[in-house]
Image: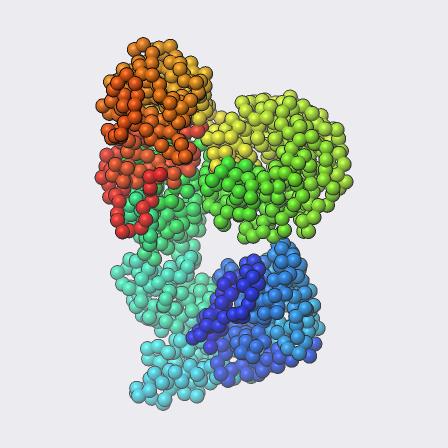
Amino acid sequence: MAYPNIDARHGMFNHVGRDLYIAPDRDESTGRILRQLQPACMDASDRAECLPGTRVAMIQLIMDWALDPISTQNIFWVHGLAGIGKSTLSTTIANRCRDQGHLGAFLFFSRDVAERSNPATVIRTLAYQIGLFNTRAGEAIATAIAKFPSVCLSPLSVQFQKLIVEPLASVTDEQTTLVLVIDGLDECGTAKKRELLLEVLVEKLIQLPPSIRILITSRSEHDICSAFGQRPQFLEQKFDIASGVNTDDISSYLHHRMERVRSKTKGLSLGNQRPNEDDIRRLTERASGLFVWASTASDFIDGYDPRKRMDIVLKGGVASEAEDTLDILYRTALESAGNWDDEDFVADFISLVGLVLVAQHPLSSTAIDRLLCTGRPCAYTISHLGCVLQQTPTVRPLHPSFADFLTTRSRCGRNIWFFDRIPCKLNLAILCLRRLSQVLCRNICSMTLSVDLEDETLAEDVKYACMFWIEHICAIKDEITSVILDLDFFLNRHLLHWLEAMSILRKSRDAIGLLDKLFIWMTSECPNSGILIELVYDACRLSRTFAASIEEHPLLVYFSALPFAPVTSAIYQMFHDVDTFPTIAGGYQQSWTPQLLVMAGHEGFVRSVASSPDGNRVVSGSDDHTVRVWDARTGAQIFPPLRGHQGLVYAVAFSPDGILIISGSGDGIIRVWDARTGAEVLPLLRGHEREVWTVAFSPNGSRIASGSGDKTVRIWDIISGAEVLPALRGHENSVRSVVFCPDGTRIVSGSDDHTIRIWDANTGGEVLAPLRGHNDVVRAIALSPDGTRIVSGSNDQTIRIWDANSGVQLLPPLRGHSEAVQSVAFSPDGLRIASGSSDHTIRIWNANSDAEALLVLRRHDASVKSVSFSLNGAWITSGSSDKTVRVWHTTASDANLPSAPGHKDVVRAIAFSPDGTRVVSGSNDKTIRVWDARSGVEVVPAMKGHEGMILSVAFSPDGSQIVSGSEDTTVRVWDASSGDEVLAPLRGHDDLVRSVAFSPDGRKIVSGSRDRSIRVWNVGSGTEAIPPVNEHFVRSVAFSSDGTRIISGSRRNGKTRSVWDAKGSRLSRSSTSDNFSRRNIDVVQDRWIVDFSDNRTISFLPYMIDVDICLATNGKSIAIGTPGGRVFVLHFPPSLFTSSESRVIKGRGRPIARRS
């Protein structure tokens, strides 16, 4: 009987043949609280029990101890060699205790299952299972979690005390035992990793109530023996494989197995009724006390011609050591497996077993056949190795000792049986590359951009090859040339196909780390493969930069990521085809920028970011009221957004050990989160009377400092959540930033009152007089790693560096930002300072000089609200009002290049010329610019004259003139070739001009304004052609195609359209609304670019571009203006409008794009 399958995360135990639900009447709230323990899943569905009649004395001994409430020794430790049956014994005990109502928990470890080999989860999993098996104990544990919300983040000794010792002491019945079974402790991490766990077990197990019984099994590892040996509270039982009892048990097992062999061969003329008693006796002798030997030998004999196989096993002498016993058995089994003089059989054996030994996870025989491509099914070879290889559902060694045997030259005996893992990995790497080269192609699953993926998948062998070819290649240190040719062929033809396949497998984020690993391997092992290394580098950048797009849909590798890659990059040059894929005029970028990653997901401004101490994670807080945790290398969100705040999240921070996250919000509350799970671990920290602008951890993580709009700084205890000092008062306005000094003795704060103050963290008193120098709000402060310097950033656009002990400014102000400095940070070595500003840039400064910035990073489309260095100082993370979190390389050579030609502020208006060869744009920077639609080059000097931001632009029908409407209330007409003004400004509106358009004959202009009027002007004279009409706030105006009518869009309790008759001497409402041009290509809110004339999805706007764009189309191209001032034109090839990849398929998936 197998033990139940314990899924600790769902509170359900599956038993073979029946289901067992624990405590069905349990209060659901208790179950919810227990699930906060995040226990490991224990899958025991394939665990076997001892055969009847075996281990009788040992089982009885343990059960007598387990059920005896007055025994003074409550810990029973069973240990011995691998393969002697400890796990079957522990499973048998657990089953019997369960059947008699005494089981409290059953934990079993496996080094091959990460979740079941982590010492950090042991106590939480133990507590969870106790809570499930015992209702009273579960309630007591749930109460402990509610009382100490951060207990799961506490040291293991505290966890054991609060979750196990104290709850069990309060509910245990002294007359009834509760048994905890822990099997395979030696497989719970390495000796170093489980060192602390062993210390806690030794200290805490003896503190449990006397009626608690703990059975522990393990190998006789040195660290476990040192911890448990010769302790009076421990009953110790070492398996003696040479004992008569153990020999009898193996004999019983062999009788059982040989009876099955006899029953299968009954009636055949095998002679002497074998296997007989003498055979079993001799088998027992050869087992040398190892159950694994008895099991393997039985499997071998139970094959074709059992009598012959029996003779083979029994031939020769008895080994003296257990390992020798196994080796003799494995050699015997292999000798009989086939004809070792047959070259084909030997080749098949080497191919099959070599693959099985190094595969990252077991494969089916079908997948192996497809990878090997020998033409002979591997099932034939496997059938000859049935006693050592499992065939279904996957092919794997029946016992780990067989793999050890084959990979140890001194043990296996013959060269053809010895496997060196490195050449095996080389061979499997080549097999993977060749298999992928055979099957990968563009759109391998015949997908369409117009629908979501449903159940697209890839065959098992292709999936394996996609996921692990890089792992196998990177294990190779010699014979590099044998794989380079295959690698070159694969990368030059199928690199993008592989990225598509990884997206199909929903592993596109994993591709980032794999490509990084491949790049490092290539630069180290084959540095002369320059072109190939460049291609792999480009793939690293492409997969990281466009991770979110590629994850969105596999085909976006080609239709979004590739078109936006640098036009000079090897990957663009090799794979981009202008007749197939979208093309950006002049290229979106010429080379890779310092920007490594864009993390998109927030729906509001990103106010704060922080890097974890290990550099692997980033936390962000946003106006969308959420806190999000990201993988710093891939950009993936690690878990769903953390919700709870009722206001904007202004501040976030990691604890020094990376285990906790704190957040401060406009709701005046500070929340504390588990950085590993996202669960809240403390009651809300309340005390501030207004928004919390800033939060910080003390260096030892025991306290939190916060600053608020209520003008105070407050200090909190991380364990209790209580304030440890009265509020620190002195600032005369909001406290925008706080930080602890490195030794935790002082706190520095910056305020809207233009000052910086330094406080004693223990008394709350001010240490120095306020630091004065800024002449506007001090938005940000940071301390150098050695605590000797303070850096501050202000709305006055300057950065200042102060002596932390004297308060004296050490350097003249650092100048360069053109708007408020929102954030500052010191690099870990204290040599550099990063600053983020409302001018959309990040600047890197020499911390010891007042010289200009060392680097200027440009890509954000809005104010940079927060910056943070990584632990190694190589990366900077930033958060912005453009709703993104971005990661930058701080040493990139092109970081200081001037910003691309274009506008210096938000592009508000954009339009194509009638012939589609030019694009005009207008911006908040008060200029109008004209661009060549094919090259992306600016072709006319910037048109300057407006005194406010440009809100609308349009070409005349013949393309010779441009009209513009502005915030300055004027309409202006320009020569499209020279940029000169053609007329004096057209004045008449009393508020900003929101929209302008030419009539089809080019003789009139219509304008709409926030002053609620529509005006029509004569182009020749600049006079009003028709008296104005009043409408609601006019957002858009346009002439009909025949020029007889005007349509206006306004807002009155929603969107409103009006049509006006323009034929007479005044405008009058018209009842018809046809013959107006409509934009056929548009970007919908979820970034998909759609051709609505045929309802086709044709591309996707990458997340590096703010979706808050202005857009124009001329039918087959779109011009886009961004909040960062960028203008680019995206051309779509004619083939894309007829391609099956953009077609709409009914009845398959859901449509992706919908017009808003």
* Rendering coords of residue 33 (x, y %): 57, 60
The answer to whether 1149 appears left or right of 116 in the picture is left
* Rendering coords of residue 660 (x, y %): 60, 48
Q: Quadrant of residue 809?
A: top right
The answer to whether 155 appears left or right of 253 in the picture is right
Q: Nearer the viewer, residue 520 or 103?
A: 103
The residue under the point 25% across, 39% down is 1094
* Rendering coords of residue 519 (x, y %): 43, 42
Residue 884, placed above or below residue 339:
above
Q: Quadrant of residue 705?
A: top right
* Rendering coords of residue 336 (x, y %): 36, 73
The residue under the point 39% across, 56% down is 424
The answer to whether 903 appears left or right of 1066 in the picture is right
Q: Quadrant of residue 541?
A: top left
Residue 323, placed above or below residue 661:
below
Q: Nearer the viewer, residue 337 or 644?
A: 644
Task: Please say which color scheme the image uses.
Answer: rainbow
